[in-house]
Image (spheres, helix red, strand yellow):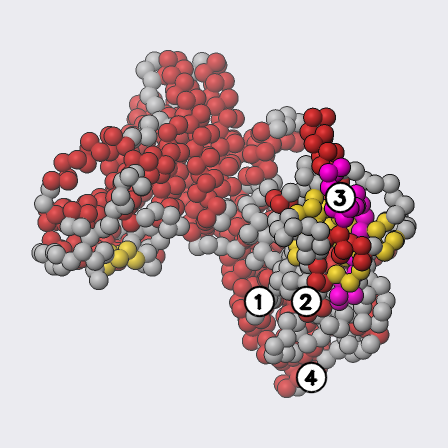
C-alpha cells in the first residue's frame, strides 16, 4: 500500500546528480542535413524503428514548448530563480535573527497551514518544505524559531509514522514521500549527515519547553498592548510541544500514558483557542502571492525534486481554515482516545464505524487504529498472514484473541468458553483455540477497513466477505465438534460470525447509496434486499444470540442455584430495535419505488441495452460466496412479480405503514442521538409524502420524484416536484 | 527473430538517400538546442516530415538568467516540435546503441 517512501531517500535529495559519472560526448552538427532529409518523408509518415518504437509509445511523450506539459518552459519557471536558504539569508530576503513576534507568528501559522495541506494529500516538497527555515534549522540563531523548526521535523516524522503504522490511507489521502528530507532523527536536509545535529525526542521537547518559558516571561514583562503577541507566540510553541508529545504517546502507545495523553490533548485545545484568537497578529500572506507568508516561503524551491509532470504548485490551505482544521483535529483525537475505554469488541466496532461516518481526517483515523490495538490492526493482520511465530509476534495476536473470545462469550456464551466448561473435552477446546486464531485476520482487517476513507471502504468490504465466507465454514464445523462434545449442538460460533457477516453485507449495500453509485431505477432491488433479507436476518441473528446466551445463564443458575434473574436485560435490545426501524424504512422505500414505476414516474432503461438481471447480479456479486447464499435474480423476480399487478395506491399505503412503524419505534427510544433524530425526520417526512401520493396527489405526473440524501447519507427524503 | 529482421534490412536498401541516413541515426544520442536556449540530450527515436523529433531517456540542460548552468532535469520521453529546433548534433564516437528499449528493459 503506502510503504513506498522510506527507500526513496537518497535519490531525491537536494543535489542528486552530484556523484553521477561525467559523460563526454563528441558532438557533430547535423542540423541542415537533418532538416533536408526529413523533407523526403511523406506527409504523415513516421520514421522510426518499427519493432521497438511506434505510435503507441509516441503518445506518452511530453511535448516540449507546450505550456501545459513543459514545466521547464520560461513561462513556467518562476523568474527569477528561487533562492535557497543560504542565498535568501545573504540577500536579506529572510531574517534569521531579531525577528518581530508578528513575523514569527506569521511563519508558524503558515507552516501549520502547510502541514494541513500535506495532511490533505499534497506532497511534502510542495507544502511544508517550501518553508526555507526548515532547510537548515540548525543555522537559525533565533531560538524560538529554531526550536519550532526542529520540532516540525520531529512532528512530521511522528505523523508519518502514525499513518504508516495504521495503513488506512490510499494515494488520495496522503503522500508519505520524504523527498530526501531526513525527517525525524537528523533534522537537516541534503546528503550531509552530521551526528552532532541529532536531536532526540527529549531534547526537542525540552528545547520547546525552554522557549515557552522564555516567551511567557516576555509576555508577562510587557503591558497589555504587546502582551497579546508574545502570549500568542508562547501558545504556538506550547501547542507544538504538547501536540508532538500527545502524538508520540499515541504512536508509541504504552499502558501508562493514558492520563497524560488526555491532559496533553486538552491542553492543545486550550492553546488552539489562543492561537485562533491571535491569528490576526501575525504577518499575513500577500495578496495574489503563492507563498503562504511574505517571508520564508518559496513555493517553487523543490520543483526539481518532483517528477516532470507534477503539478506546478500546490495551493496552500487558507490560514484560518488551517487553524480550524488543527482545532478540530485535536477534538477528533480526543474523541478517538475514548476507544481505549471500549472493552467490548462490539462497542469498539460500533465506535470505529461511527468515527468513520464523521469522515475524519487521515491522522485521526490512523490514531484511532493505533489506540485500539497495538501496534495496529493492519500490522496484526499481516503478522498472521506472514505466520510470524516469534514470541514478540504472538503477544499482540494473543491480546486480540482474548478480545474476540470475550466478544463471543458475551454475545452467545457457548459452554465451551465458560470458566468451568461443561462437557467440553480437550480436543474441542483446542478446536476453539484454532478457530479464534483464524478469526484474528478477518476481524483485524474489518477494523482496518473501517479506518479507510468512505469511498475505499466499499471495495474492501467486498474483498473481506471472501475471508468471512471461509470463516463461516469453520465456525460451523467448530459448532459441530463442540456440540457433539456437549451433547446437543447449537450454532454458537456460527451465529457470532453470521452477525458480523450481515453487518458487513449491509454496510456494503448502503455504501453504494452514500457514494451515489446506484441509478434510481436500481433502488428498488437494493431496498428490497435490505428489507426482505438482510435486516430480517440480522434481527433473527440477534434474537438467536440472546436466546443462546440466555440458555447459558440458565445453565449457570441451575448449577449455582442462585436467583440472578434478568442479570443482563436484553443487551441488544436497542440494536435489534434499530434494525427493525431500518428494515421498515427499507420496506417503505421499496414499496414506494415499485409504485413509482407502476405510475411511470421512474424511467427504466431499455432492457436490450441495460439489462436489469445483469445489473442485479453485479450489485450483489460479492454476496455469492456467503451463507446464507445470494438471492438470485430469478428469485427476486418471482418474489416481486405479484406486486407488478398491485394498485399503486395500495403500495403507497403499505410504504406509508412502514414509515409509520419506523417512526413509532424510533420515538420509543428514550435517549435519541443525532442518528436517531435524523432517521426520525426522514421517516416522518416520507410518511407524509407517501400519504399524499396514496391520496392521488400528482397521480398522472410522470416527473420523477427526487431523492434527497442531505438529511441522512443512506436514507433519502422523498420529494415530489 | 531473423525472419522479422529481414524485411527491415531489405527496406533500408530500398530507401534511398535521406531516409536511409535518418534511419542510421535512430537510437543514437542527439543533442538538440531549442529556440528558448535549452539543450535536450536523449536517444533519437522518431521523426516526421515536419522534423518533429522524439527523444527517449531525455535530460534537459538549462541556463539561468546569469548564464550559469543549472542541474540537468530528467524528462524521459519527449517530443520536440520541429519549429522549435535550433540545432541538432549527434554523438559521433559512442558506438550505436542498437536497441534502446532492450537497454532499459
Q: Chain of mark 2?
A: A
Q: Which mark is residue B16?
A: 3
Q: Do the residues marked 4 and 2 share a common chain?
A: yes
Magenta segment boundaries in residue numbering:
B12-37
- Real-space CA distance between mark 3 and mark 4, rounded to the nearest whole angstrom: 89 Å
Q: Quadrant location of residue A543?
A: top left
Q: Which residue is mark 2?
A: A76
Q: Do the residues marked 3 and 2 share a common chain?
A: no
| Residue B23 within the segment the image draws in magenta | yes
| Residue B22 within the segment the image draws in magenta | yes
* Vertical position of residue B15 compared to residue A601: above or below: above
Residue located 12% across and 56% down the image: A699
Q: Which residue is mark 4?
A: A222
- Real-space CA distance between mark 1 and mark 4, rounded to the nearest whole angstrom: 33 Å
x, y percent for residue A672? 30, 54
Quarter containing the C terminus of chain A: bottom left
Classify mark 2: residues with Cα within 10 Å, few (<14), some (14-19) or many (20+): few
Classify mark 3: residues with Cα within 10 Å, few (<14), some (14-19) or many (20+): few
x, y percent for residue A177? 67, 51
x, y percent for residue A327? 54, 64
Q: Secondary structure at mark 3?
A: loop
Quarter containing the N terminus of chain A: top right
Decide which of tag 1 and tag 4 comes sooner along the chain: 4
Q: Nearer the viewer, mark 4 or mark 2?
A: 2
Decide which of tag 1 and tag 2 comes sooner along the chain: 2
Q: Which mark is residue A612?
A: none
Amino acid at each position: 500500500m503506502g510503504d513506498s517512501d522510506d527507500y526513496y531517500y537518497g535519490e531525491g535529495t537536494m543535489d542528486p546528480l552530484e556523484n553521477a559519472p561525467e559523460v563526454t560526448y563528441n558532438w557533430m552538427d547535423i542540423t541542415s542535413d537533418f532538416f533536408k532529409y526529413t523533407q523526403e518523408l511523406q506527409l504523415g509518415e513516421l520514421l522510426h524503428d518499427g519493432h521497438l518504437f511506434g505510435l503507441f509509445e509516441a503518445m506518452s511523450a511530453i511535448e516540449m514548448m507546450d505550456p501545459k506539459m513543459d514545466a521547464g518552459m520560461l513561462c513556467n519557471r518562476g523568474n527569477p530563480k528561487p533562492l535557497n536558504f543560504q542565498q535568501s539569508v545573504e540577500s536579506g530576503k529572510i531574517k534569521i535573527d531579531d525577528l518581530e513576534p508578528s513575523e514569527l507568528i506569521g511563519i508558524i501559522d503558515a507552516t501549520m497551514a502547510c502541514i494541513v495541506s500535506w495532511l490533505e494529500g499534497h506532497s511534502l516538497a510542495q507544502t511544508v518544505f517550501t518553508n526555507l527555515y526548515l532547510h537548515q534549522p540548525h543555522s537559525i540563531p533565533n531560538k524560538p524559531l529554531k526550536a519550532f523548526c526542529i520540532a516540525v521535523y520531529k512532528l512530521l516524522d511522528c505523523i508519518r509514522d502514525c499513518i504508516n503504522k495504521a495503513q488506512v490511507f490510499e494515494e488520495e489521502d496522503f503522500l508519505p514521500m520524504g523527498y530526501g528530507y531526513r525527517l525525524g532523527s537528523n533534522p537537516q536536509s541534503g546528503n550531509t549527515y552530521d551526528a552532532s545535529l541529532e536531536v532526540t525526542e527529549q531534547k526537542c521537547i525540552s528545547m520547546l519547553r525552554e522557549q515557552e518559558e522564555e516567551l511567557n516571561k516576555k509576555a508577562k514583562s510587557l503591558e497589555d498592548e504587546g502582551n497579546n503577541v508574545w502570549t500568542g507566540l508562547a501558545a504556538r510553541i506550547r501547542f507544538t510541544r504538547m501536540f508532538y508529545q500527545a502524538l508520540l504517546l499515541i504512536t508509541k502507545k504504552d499502558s501508562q500514558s493514558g492520563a497524560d495523553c488526555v491532559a496533553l490533548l486538552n491542553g492543545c485545545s486550550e492553546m488552539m483557542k489562543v492561537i485562533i484568537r491571535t491569528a490576526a497578529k501575525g504577518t499575513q500572506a500577500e495578496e495574489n502571492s503563492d507563498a503562504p507568508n511574505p517571508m520564508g516561503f518559496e513555493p517553487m524551491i523543490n520543483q526539481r525534486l518532483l517528477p516532470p509532470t507534477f503539478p506546478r504548485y500546490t495551493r496552500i490551505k487558507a490560514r484560518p481554515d488551517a487553524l480550524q482544521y488543527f482545532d478540530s483535529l485535536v477534538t477528533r483525537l480526543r474523541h478517538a482516545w475514548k476507544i481505549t475505554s471500549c472493552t467490548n469488541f462490539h462497542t469498539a466496532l460500533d465506535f470505529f464505524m461511527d468515527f468513520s461516518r464523521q469522515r475524519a481526517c487521515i491522522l485521526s483515523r490512523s490514531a484511532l487504529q493505533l489506540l485500539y490495538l497495538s501496534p495496529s490492526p493492519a500490522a496484526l493482520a499481516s503478522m498472521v498472514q506472514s505466520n510470524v511465530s516469534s514470541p514478540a509476534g504472538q503477544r499482540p495476536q494473543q491480546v486480540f484473541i482474548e478480545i474476540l473470545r470475550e466478544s463471543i462469550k458475551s454475545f452467545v456464551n457457548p459452554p465451551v468458553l465458560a470458566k468451568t466448561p461443561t462437557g467440553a473435552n480437550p480436543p474441542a477446546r483446542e478446536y476453539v483455540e484454532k478457530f479464534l486464531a483464524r478469526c484474528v485476520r478477518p476481524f483485524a482487517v474489518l477494523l482496518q477497513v473501517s479506518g479507510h476513507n468512505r469511498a475505499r471502504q466499499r471495495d474492501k468490504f467486498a474483498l473481506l466477505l471472501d475471508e468471512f465466507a471461509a470463516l463461516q465454514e469453520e465456525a460451523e464445523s467448530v459448532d459441530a465438534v463442540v456440540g457433539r462434545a456437549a451433547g446437543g449442538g447449537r450454532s454458537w460460533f456460527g451465529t457470532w460470525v453470521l452477525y458480523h457477516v450481515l453487518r458487513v453485507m449491509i454496510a456494503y449495500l448502503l455504501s453504494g447509496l452514500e457514494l451515489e453509485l446506484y441509478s434510481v431505477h436500481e433502488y428498488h432491488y437494493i431496498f428490497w434486499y435490505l428489507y426482505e433479507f438482510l435486516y430480517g436476518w440480522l434481527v433473527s441473528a440477534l434474537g438467536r444470540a440472546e436466546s443462546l446466551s440466555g440458555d447459558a445463564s440458565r445453565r449457570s443458575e441451575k448449577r449455582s442455584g442462585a436467583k440472578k434473574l434478568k442479570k443482563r436485560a436484553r443487551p441488544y435490545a436497542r440494536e435489534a430495535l434499530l434494525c427493525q426501524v431500518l428494515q421498515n424504512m427499507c420496506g417503505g422505500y421499496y414499496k414506494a419505488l415499485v409504485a413509482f414505476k407502476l405510475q411511470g414516474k421512474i424511467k427504466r432503461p431499455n432492457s436490450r441495452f441495460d439489462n436489469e438481471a445483469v445489473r442485479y447480479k453485479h450489485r450483489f456479486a460479492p454476496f455469492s460466496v456467503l451463507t446464507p447464499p445470494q438471492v438470485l435474480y430469478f428469485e427476486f423476480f418471482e418474489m416481486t412479480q405479484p406486486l407488478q399487478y398491485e394498485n399503486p395506491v395500495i403500495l403507497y399505503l403499505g410504504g406509508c405503514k412502514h414509515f409509520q412503524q419506523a417512526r413509532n419505534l424510533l420515538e420509543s427510544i428514550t435517549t435519541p442521538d443525532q442518528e436517531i433524530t435524523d432517521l426520525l425526520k426522514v421517516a416522518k417526512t416520507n410518511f407524509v409524502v407517501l400519504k399524499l401520493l396514496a391520496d392521488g396527489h400528482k397521480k398522472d405526473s410522470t416527473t420523477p420524484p427526487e431523492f434527497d440524501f442531505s438529511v441522512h447519507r443512506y436514507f433519502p427524503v422523498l420529494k415530489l416536484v | 527473430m531473423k525472419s522479422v529482421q529481414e524485411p527491415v534490412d531489405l527496406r533500408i536498401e530500398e530507401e534511398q538517400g535521406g531516409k536511409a541516413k535518418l534511419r542510421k541515426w535512430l537510437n543514437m544520442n542527439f543533442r538538440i538546442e531549442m529556440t528558448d536556449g535549452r539543450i535536450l540530450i536523449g536517444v533519437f527515436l522518431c521523426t516526421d516530415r515536419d522534423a518533429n523529433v522524439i527523444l527517449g531517456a531525455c535530460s534537459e540542460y538549462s541556463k539561468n538568467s546569469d548564464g550559469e548552468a543549472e542541474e540537468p532535469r530528467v524528462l524521459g520521453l519527449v517530443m520536440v516540435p520541429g519549429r522549435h529546433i535550433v540545432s541538432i548534433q549527434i554523438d559521433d564516437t559512442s558506438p550505436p546503441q542498437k536497441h534502446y528499449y532492450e537497454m532499459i528493459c
